[in-house]
């Protein structure tokens, strides 16, 4: 099992599949979900693992499909979380 600890350098905003656009109504008007769902984070994890195996966006055929799956499944990858940690203290859903 591998533990991924993510920390922000700037503000984080998460929402569905819609992308954010520059100048989009200011931060007071951006709908955001926190914590982000595992669906959002699995993209980050899969991309990071694939790039570590040499995959690049301009070589889609080199995607490690057996390990990291495709748009239909996660392959051998199994994920849990996300779980929040603040000041060395873990917070889990009840």
Image (cartoon, grey):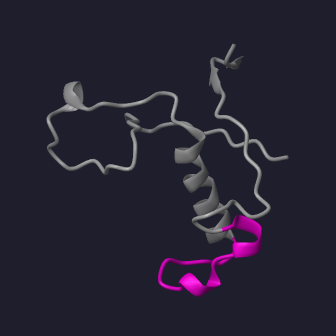
| Residue farthest to the right, as pictured | 1
> From the viewer's perspective, is 30 left or right of 10?
left
- Can you give x and y, in whole percent of width and height, for residue 74 in the image? 69, 60
Vertical position of residue 90 compared to residue 31: above or below: above
Q: Which residues are magenta?
A: 53-69
Residue 24: x, y in percent?
A: 17, 41
In the picture, measured across the screen, residue 25 lies left or right of residue 72, that is left
What is the quadrant of residue 61 in the picture? Answer: bottom right
Return the residue nearer the eye: 50 or 37: 37
Q: Residue at x 20, y 28 (%)?
A: 29
Identify the residue at image location x=69%, y=13%.
Answer: 94
Q: Residue furthest front?
A: 72
Using the image, determine if residue 1 lies above or below residue 48: above
Query: In x, y percent, where is residue 39?
Result: 56, 46
Percent x, y of residue 28: 21, 24
Residue 36 position (above or below residue 1): above
Give yes or no for residue 8 being in the magenta stretch.
no
């Amino acid at each position: 099992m591998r533990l991924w600890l993510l920390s922000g350098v700037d503000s984080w905003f998460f929402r569905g599949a819609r992308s954010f656009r520059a100048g989009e109504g200011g931060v007071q008007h951006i709908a955001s979900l926190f914590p982000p769902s595992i669906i959002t984070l699995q993209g980050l994890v899969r991309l990071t693992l694939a790039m570590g195996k040499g995959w690049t966006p301009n070589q889609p055929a080199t995607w490690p499909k057996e390990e990291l799956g495709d748009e239909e499944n996660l392959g051998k990858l199994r994920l849990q979380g996300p779980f929040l940690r603040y000041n060395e203290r873990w917070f889990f859903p009840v």
